[in-house]
Image (cartoon, rainbow, N blue to C red):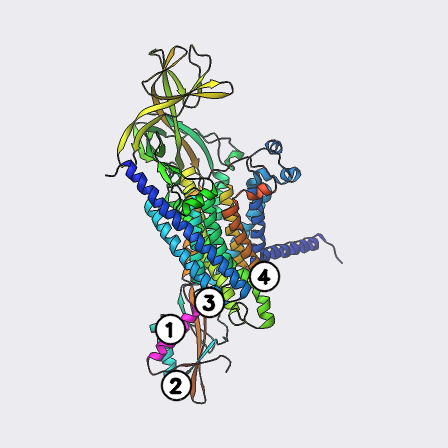
Amino acid sequence: MLNSDSILSMASYLLGIELRLFWASSLFYTMALLLFIFHTVTRAVIFGKAARTALVAGVLAQAGLISLRAFEAGRAPAQTLYETLSWFALSAAVAYLYSSRRWRNIYLPGVLVSAVSAGACLYALFAASPAIEPLSPVLQSRWFEWRQINMFFSYAVFAVSASIEATYLIISPFVKKDCAPCYGLTAENIRDFHRSAFRLVLFGYPFLTFAIFSGAVWANNTFGRYWSWDAGQTWSLITWTVFTIYLHAKSVPALTGRAASAFNIIGFVSILATTFLGVNWLAGLLGIPLLRIYAL
Amino acid sequence: MNYSEENIRSALTERLHSAINRAYLRLASTTTAVCILGLMCVFYLAGTVFPQGVSLTEYINGGGGFVFLVALLDLLDFFTSPVFLILAFTLFLNLLVCVYEKYPSLFVKGPYPAEFTPEHSVALTQDLKEAFEKVREVFVKELGFRPVESESRWNVVQKGLPCGLLTWLFHAGAAVCFLGFILTYLFAYDGTMRLAPKKASTVVPRETGRLKSLWTAKDGPTDFHLYLDEFVTEYSEYPDLDYPEDRTARLAVGLGWSSPSYELREDSLFVKDWKARIKVIRGNNTLREKTAEVNSPLKYGGYTFYLAGWADTVKVSVDRNPILLEVLSGDEIFVPGLLDPLVFGDVKSGRVYRLDGRTEDLRPFTTVKRKSGVGYEYLGKVLFGDSVTLNGHSITPAGFETGAVLNYRYDPGAGVLWAGGLLLLSALALRVFIGRATAAYDLVELDGIVFLNLFVSSEGLGYSPDKTVAALTRHLTKDDIRPQEIPPGQ
């Protein structure tokens, strides 16, 4: 049996490796972002391809660190802010790489996705603690684990969808006007490209729905109330409602165009607001006092 | 014109019917759903911006603005305000009407359009009859499609799940969830109780649900009692991480110039779990027995009992006096001979799980503080049986009792919500991840060549039209039918 000192040394050593991997993945995502920006400025396909490669490298490093942390912590590593941001960054990059696998020379949505992944990683590294601490009894629940994993996974998928939507909104007028390829988008492929944004929301929506339900089951088992209108819960409901509107708008001819696209972007903004700015940011912005801290 | 009473009544009835019809049609529309959901979003946002559950005075004293709006719309208790409830109820009606409207369409087959616009056209070399049989065989036997009745010349085949039914089911699930919310809103109530060790306690509610509160202020006491048999606390030893707060220093860790390190400090104990062995008793009968934990409540008689925490009663001996003083941990106690009151902290007792895998029983201890001006002076940690001497008086924590703090809740809506949620989630997952593929094909002979005109569509993510066309082409190529795809419109 190892004594406490040996256990602590090993834990410190593993955390050191994990942090280096995390910094490496952040570096790869940042490189990908810069290369995607070069591609946007120069329109050179080579930068797009290089950016994609950097993104793959970032994903491999991050998958490694998440596996290492799962081994260290002995649980799913998606429960603290540090862990959820890491999971979010990985999910966004993987969702982008998967959905873009059949695109030919289309790299523009990568700008937003790599910015989101790099931003999430750097935010976790600079603002959150990487310590693996024991979970309080309240958080020791499979339902809470599922909530976190599914919620941040769906957020990542929605972020990729929003990047496609934004690209479509910016590029489609040029494609329609010139009929010439614009960043790999042509009159023939732009419809399928735009449809992938809808398919991503469709894919992520059940995950977010399940996350909200598992959060409610967890809250009910722990606090005796499945819903308490705390800011965290309400923001996830706002995001869910916005994407519900988006999916409904897609079936209404009058709303299926730019109105639906706007809802997709609004959904992404609400994700950014909750993930990076915190749930009480709007109150702070309007100068409204936070007189009650909501319990999770 | 005759303005008789009958005519006026008839005109009014007609107008009323017309208004109801218009309202019904409006409620049945998806655009209305989009509008209501949009408004709900704005309302949710308002509920997160303004602090909920505080009084207007507290809000104003805290420096809050928009006071007129806050008071008018009841923004400090927004989620139970009339404005919010009316909108939520309208959404519920919208959902009900949509579910009701879609119900008959579940039993209608088709109708498929009389004409499909072919998206793929394939030239086949066989004669018309043979080609027809072959294409049908590939669709049904190789690709698993089933023929669907169609009144047009097009042959329609389908694969997968009935998407219309699944869409209807998850909307119905959402309506059931709403019903659960309504039941909770009308009938749920909760409270807190303390269970002393080895004593029976009755649940005496201090309130009742919103609806019942119209004729009675509180529910009666339960006919069963709760008995706390045992309360156990478990701790785990956890290390602190020596890790810099400064960003540059953090970057240095990432570059390998410095390393993070875990350190074990004295008494770094973390509450791992707390458990209460509770019996439900009536008379001499034990009706139910359970070890309740934080995420595992006890359910009985429509109530759910959640283990919220514990409360320690510390028994104190002054100058070895056998008559003990009793005080709840955290409360102030005046000890004879001392001017300032003392406060005993939470009692730490139970099992400790050490980092190296050892487990041991903790020797119970508490902490002592003395009131000093507006604050407290920390006097230290005291093991039970040991003493601290203050102003010449020996203060000995001689013993303690740990009771359980339970939150209880009566909520008939929760079960309904889970049932609705299960229906919603399963139907939604099947609809989105499996879905259905529909193919329509037509064979025409033109100048001795048989053409297969094909239209494939899919709902959900499980089937891809491109993959279906590719698989069909592959199967047709396998034998002597040689398809040659030609661009549509030729």
Instruction: Please name the amino acid that badge 1 sits on.
Output: Ala
Residue at 45% from the left image edge and 63% from the top image edge: A50
Are discs 2 and 1 located on one and the same chain? Answer: yes
List the residue tagged with mark 1: B471
* Residue furthest left in the image: A1
State how far apart marks 3 and 2 are (Cα).
34 Å
Instruction: Please name the amino acid that badge 2 sits on.
Output: Thr
* Residues rendered magenta in the picture: B460-478
Is residue A18 something that shows in the picture? Answer: yes
Instruction: Tell me where residue B394 sits by quadrant.
Output: top left
In the figure, is residue B481 to the left or right of B103? left
List the residue tagged with mark 3: A103
Residue at 51% from the left image edge and 18% from the top image edge: B373
State how far apart marks 4 and 3 are (Cα).
23 Å
Question: The residue marked by circle 1 belongs to what chain?
Answer: B
Question: From what the image shows, is residue B43 above or below residue B396?
Answer: below
Sequence-wise first label, 2 or 1: 2
Residue B78 horizontal/vertical position (percent): 57, 40
List the residue tagged with mark 4: A258
Is residue B463 rendered magenta in the image? yes
- In the image, which disc is placed on residue B125? 2
Residue at 43% from the left image edge and 47% from the top image edge: A84
Are discs 4 and 3 located on one and the same chain? Answer: yes
Q: Secondary structure at mark 3?
A: loop
Residue B112 horizontal/vertical position (percent): 48, 71
Residue at 48% from the left image edge and 80% from the top image edge: B487
Closer mark to the observer between disc 4 and disc 3: 3
